Structure formats: structure tokens, C-alpha cells
Amino acid sequence: MTALQGVRAPVLEGTRTPFLRLVRVELRKQLDTRASRWILAVIALVTLAAAALSLWILEPAGLTFRTLSDMTSAGWGMLLPVIGVLAATSEWTQRTGLQTFVLEPRRTLVNLAKLVSALLVGLAMAAATFAAAAIANLVGIAAFDGDGSWALEPTYVVGILASMAVYVAMGVGLGLSLLSTPLAIVAFIVLPIVFPTLALVPWLADIVPWVDIGGALLPIIEGSPSGEEWARFAVSAAAWCALPLAIGLWRTARREVA
Amino acid sequence: MIEARALTKRYGSALAVDSVSFTAKPYRVTGFLGPNGAGKSTTMRMLVGLARPDSGEARILGAPFVDVPNPGRHVGVLLDASASHAGRTGRETLALAALTMGLGPGAVDRALDRVGLSRKEAARRTGGYSLGMRQRLGIASALLADPSVLILDEPANGLDPSGIRWIRTLVREFADDGGTVLLSSHLLQEIDAVADDIVIMGGGRVHAHGSRAELVGEGSLEDAFFAATSGLSRDGADA
């Protein structure tokens, strides 16, 4: 590169760290701390409790794979984003960024690896949710005289996966843009509650459906959303996922690591 | 080789680092001496891309740090030993670094042995570590990939006398093997005991920079330090 290169020893060599390796590192970081293990344990517990509770309270005719999936997936909506938040904020709140960004100075790449690995955890969670519902359905057939129908619309699976992806991306995005674990957690717990309430204000009633991500997800999960419902989903997902992610990537790329 | 060229960093109206230039060479331990708040840590953060200089540039092994592929393989960095995830074990902290750098199995155990952390200590969460253990863990992390450059910010903090002797021996051997060491301290005797070259910093500026013989001459490092930082010194202040 420069004329002085010849006198410098040793010569720089080596290849850039591959993105998949960064994903592996981030995946491991999301599972190797006490905080993240507690969250996963609580999610597992909530899912199991939801399955058990459904067997208890639902009429035998209502014990189907689809209904049980509804019940088991209700639990992690609130908790899954925490995984994303912690992945995003811990480099700054626990100051591990001092090591992470010295080993890989391309911070945006590291953050994208966090997003991908959090989505992988979310995917595993969604699979576990369906597995818990399947087991509950078997128990329902065997012990509770349940209907036991295995029918599951493909659109429903897509909707569940979409909401998982939205919640995880929201967690990572809010974490990266706010860089504070409590603030980000409060944001994704409080805001979805605030929006349906805001819809009661007459002059906001027309705007809220376009930014209320919880409401926009419902028709996607219920299946066969209309064109406008897709548009609302796209707009609110952009507001809650894309925008915070963009702000977060911009902010963390520039911020001083200290 | 580490080169800082006119590095400047401002926080609001405060000039934290003011046109800092120096070179740290292979086979030499370069001591970075100055009181707390002199701008040493900010300068070191700029060297490794954690802070952006407002002007000036830094090169490590001839390239800006952020352009070094897989930089941990070449440059071992310890800027703050207390900056580790309290809920992660010492071993896991090193394992993550080894995985990032693509090191083979055994690297973590070798590094633990090198810094004198037992397997039992490594299995504990770092939240319960003493500062001395954190320093050892941080140095283990810096040494993991057998780099050729070491950048250590106040590595002797929190170490007991035997630990301080150990770190001196470690950086001496590292430099004797052809490595470049930049080591900061606010303690004169730390720098005096180990440095071949000395950069004296105060108030964000380099006040003197040269080999130990050039700076100290017949006197003591203490005399040289106070002469340089009181502004009575003859050279180096306003390069």
C-alpha cells in the first residue's frame, strides 16, 4: 500500500471475518448469560403453562392443534423481544463492546449478525410453540376427549412467523436505537397498549390502524388479509422495525465505545 | 508498529486530545505516561477505532485499525479490564473472542495458563472477579491469538506486587520477541520499570517523546516528567 510497507513487520494478512461466524458468535452470546437463560426458561415455562391451562379450561370440542397453537404462542409475544433487546444493548450497558468492536470494527455487520441470530432464536421459539401445541393436542385426544383436529392453515403459520420476526426485529431495533435495556423493554410493552387506546380519540382514529403493529398483525395471523390490511402491516412494521433499526445502526456506527 | 499522526478529539468545547503524534516500534516497549485525564485513554480508543478522531489519523501495522482484516489476530487490546459481561464466565468471555477470531481449540486454555488463571477461576462469572483477576482475563484476551502488537491501558491497576512484576516480565518478553507494546500508566515507576521509549502526555498534548536515554539522560524519569509537563522543557511540546 505504501512505500513504507516493506520495513513494517509483520505484514498484515488474513481474511475478513465471515458473516456467518459473526452470527454464530452473536447466537452464542444470546444464550450464554444468566439473563438470557432466565428469559428462555420463563418463555418455556409460560408456553408449557399455556398448554396445560388450555387442556384444563377449553371445551373438548375446542381442543384442536390450531386453538392450542393460539394459546401456546400467546405467551412469548411479550418476552421474545427481550432477547433482541438484550442482544442489542448489552455491548453498551455491559460494555462488552470494548472487546466486540476491537475484534470486529465493522459494527453494522456485528449488529446485523445480532438481528439474524435473534431471528434464529425466534424461529426456534416458534417451532417449540408448535411442538408444545402438538403435544398438548395429543394429550387432549388421549385424556380429555378432545376434538384433536390437526388442521392448520398455511397462512396461520406464516402469520405466526411474521409476528415473531416483527417482535424480534422490534426488540433489536428499539435496543439499538435507545441503547437502554429498561427503556426499550418499556417501549415495546407500553406502546402496543397505548395505540389501541389512542384509537378512541376521534381525530387519531384514522391514523392509529397504520401504526398499531399489534392490530396490524391480527389479520395477517387470521389469514387472507385484504390489500389494505397488508399495507397497514407494511407501514406499521416499517415504523416499528425498519425505522428503529435504521436509527440504531446509524447511532451505534458512530458512537464512541468507552 | 503504531503510528499516531496529529490525533485530535474534542468533546463539546473541551479539547481532550490535541494533535497527538508518536510512534511505537517493534522490539520496544513504549510507555504512555501522564496523569489521569491527560487524554491517554481517548488516544488509545482512537488507535483502535472505538473513537473517531476529529482530525489526524492512526495506523497500526501500516493500516488504519478498522481496515485490518480480523484485527484481533494482529493487535491485542486491553482498554478497560472492568468491561466484561458480569453474567458470563471468564472462560466463556475468552471462548467468544476465540470464536470471533477463528482460533482453534486449545487457544483459551493456553491463554488462561499464560496469565495464571486456574480452570476453577475461569469457570466463575466475571461479576465476582477481583480487579486483578479481571486484568489477567483481559490480558489473556489480548494474547489469545498471539498478536504482534499489544495495546494495554493501565494494565497494572489492581494487580498485587507479584502481578505487577509478572506483567512487566510479560511485556518485556513480548517486545524482545519482536512485538510492539504500547502501555499506559499514570504511575511514574510503572513506566520507569519497563519502557524503552516514553511518551509523556498531559492536558491532551504530548509534552515529550523519545527513548528513555534521550528523555531521562543523567537524571531521573521523575525530573524529566516534571520538566516536560511544567512547560519548562525544551522540546517536543508543540510539535
Image (cartoon, rainbow, N blue to C red):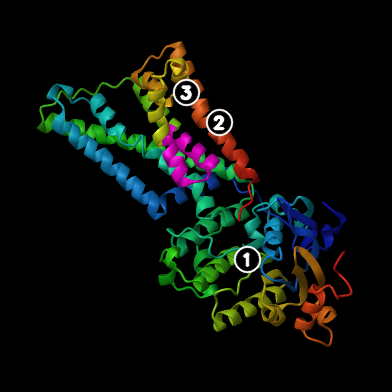
Tell if the residue under mark 1 belongs to the same chain as the one under mark 2.
no
Judge the density around disc 3: few (<14), some (14-19), many (≥20) Cα neighbours within 10 Å: many
Residue B6 horizontal/vertical position (percent): 82, 57
Residue A134 horizontal/vertical position (percent): 24, 32
Residue A116 visible, this orientation: no
Callout 1, which amino acid?
Asp
Q: Which residue is label 1 attached to?
A: B146
Left or right relative to A6: residue A198: left
Callout 2, which amino acid?
Leu
Report in which chain the residue with disc 1 lies: B
Q: Which residue is label 3 attached to?
A: A211
Q: Give the structural element (helix, strand or loop) at label 3.
A: helix
* Mark with earlier residue (2, 3): 3
Q: Give the structural element (helix, strand or loop) at label 2.
A: helix
Residue B70 horizontal/vertical position (percent): 64, 53
Judge the density around disc 2: few (<14), some (14-19), many (≥20) Cα neighbours within 10 Å: some
Which residue is drawn at the image coordinates 76% and 68% (left, top)?
B201
Judge the density around disc 1: few (<14), some (14-19), many (≥20) Cα neighbours within 10 Å: some
Which residue is drawn at the image coordinates 79% and 83% (left, top)?
B223
Q: In which quarter of the image is residue A220?
A: top left
What residue range appears in magenta? A167-188
Q: Which residue is label 2 attached to?
A: A243
